[in-house]
């Protein structure tokens, strides 16, 4: 199976500063447009996933090494809800993709370079 879609998000971001330390919070609602899934059975089937939406939040912790370099550690949680797809009729068989949810937890460690 291959899932494809473009999306937009709308949300808020805040970053609080204390000397060389920064902590933030970021969150957004996400909405997919033209979500589809391609399944490789019965000659290939394309499903319209309909209403696909979700949200994410991220909490970064940043330490400034100097004016040009910072270290960043962040946690991100990302959630998508994919509604049941359209039904495709092929002969005596009916195919559809059931409701599903995707939950991702991501830890990032990075070096930020400013120039």
Image (cartoon, rainbow, N blue to C red):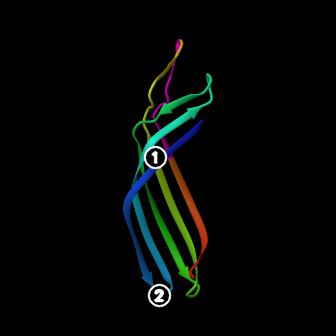
Spot occupied by residue 86 in the image (x, y as percentages of width and height): 44, 28
Task: In the rendered view, tell whether residue 61 sits above or below residue 99.
Answer: below
Which label was assigned to residue 106?
none
Q: Is residue 12 magenta?
A: no
Spot occupied by residue 3 in the image (x, y as percentages of width and height): 55, 40
The quadrant in which the C terminus is found is bottom right
The quadrant in which the N terminus is found is top right
Which residue in the structure is indicated by mark 2?
19
Disc 1, SS: strand
Q: Of discs 1 and 2, which sits in the foreground? A: 1
The span picked out in magenta is 92-102
Question: In the image, what residue occupies the spot 56% across and 34% down?
Answer: 38
Disc 2, SS: loop
User: Mark 1 to mark 2: distance in Å?
Assistant: 37 Å
Question: In the image, what residue occupies the spot 39% across and 39% down?
Answer: 51
Q: Residues within 10 Å of mark 1 (few under 14, many from 20)?
A: some
Which residue in the structure is indicated by mark 1?
80
Question: In the image, what residue occupies the spot 45% across and 36% down?
Answer: 49
First in sequence: mark 1 vs mark 2: 2
Question: In the image, what residue occupies the spot 45% across and 34% down?
Answer: 99
Name the one closer to the observer, 53 or 114. 114
Residue found farthest to the top: 92
Task: In the rendered view, tell whether residue 17 sits above or below residue 104.
Answer: below
């Amino acid at each position: 199976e291959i899932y494809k879609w473009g999306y937009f998000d709308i949300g808020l971001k805040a970053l609080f500063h204390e000397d060389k330390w920064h902590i933030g919070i970021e969150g957004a609602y996400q909405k997919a447009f033209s979500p589809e899934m391609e399944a490789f059975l019965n000659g290939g089937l394309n499903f319209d996933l309909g209403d696909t939406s979700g949200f994410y939040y991220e909490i970064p912790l940043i330490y400034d090494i100097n004016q040009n370099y910072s270290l960043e550690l962040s946690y991100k949680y990302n959630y998508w809800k994919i509604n049941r797809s359209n039904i495709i009729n092929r002969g005596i068989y009916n195919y559809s993709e059931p409701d599903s949810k995707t939950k991702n937890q991501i830890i990032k460690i990075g070096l930020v370079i400013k120039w």
